[in-house]
Amino acid sequence: MNPITFEESRSEPATTTNIIIRDAVEADLRAIIDIYNATVPTRMVTAELEPTTVEARLPWFREHSPDEYPFWVAQSEGRVIGWLDFKKFIPRCAYRGTAEISVYVHEKFRRHGVGQRLLGEALARAPSLGITALVGLILGHNEPSLKLFQRLGFERWGFLPAVAQLDGVKRDLVVVGLHCPTPSSHPKAFRVRFP
């Protein structure tokens, strides 16, 4: 995948300019896991209750394919500050065009457009990957993530009440989804320039 440099937005701090989105490599896995593990104690982003390790996540990482179910990182000034991965929604053939996506952003770079840029790139590239629908699974009390997906056109496709138990508290799961536009009908939500 060719890196894309997003034009600087005047409303964003200098720390999030010149973000490059690229395919993740195994050398990024430590940063990816650090970003993920930082969300575990918050009980807002993941249903995992304990931090994970690079070794435990290596098989998961290797399941991704740049041409089918890619794994991307957002990088700024040589540092991985966020990531997005695609995975099979359901392994049966009829669901081949639907992918589940997950987005995680380093805590110091949240609310600066990093997640939006990753999701925007996913929407723009989904048709070329043969993906016709994207699905996200978000804990019901994770308002920032729900709002992020909603801003990009995702709708609530499902609601599973009290299916997660986090420290004795029952939590809902919201399924959000979006049918991917064809490349010619995708709104130009992001101005990009190719280096």
Image (cartoon, grey):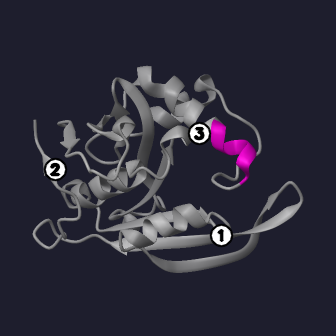
Label 3 CA crowd tier, 10 Å (few <14, some 14–19, many 20+): many
Label 2 CA crowd tier, 10 Å (few <14, some 14–19, many 20+): few
Mark 2 lies on residue: 192
Start-end of magenta stretch: 38-43
Position of the C terminus, as image quadrant, is top left
Residue 174 x, y percent position in the rendering: 60, 72
Mark 3 lies on residue: 36
CB contact under 8 Å: marks 2 and 3: no
Q: Main secondary structure of the magenta part?
A: helix
Indicate the quadrant where residue 19 lies.
top left
Mark sitting earlier along the chain (2/3): 3
Mark 1 lies on residue: 140
Give me the residue at 65% from left, 36% from top: 37
- Residues at marks 2 and 3, CA–CA distance in whole angstroms: 27 Å
Residue 63 x, y percent position in the rendering: 44, 38
The secondary structure type at the circle numbered 1 is: loop
Give me the residue at 73% from left, 52% from top: 43
The secondary structure type at the circle numbered 2 is: strand
- Residues at marks 1 and 2, CA–CA distance in whole angstroms: 32 Å
**For residue 169, above or below residue 53:** below
Q: Is residue 23 left or right of residue 5?
A: right
Give me the residue at 47% from left, 34% from top: 61
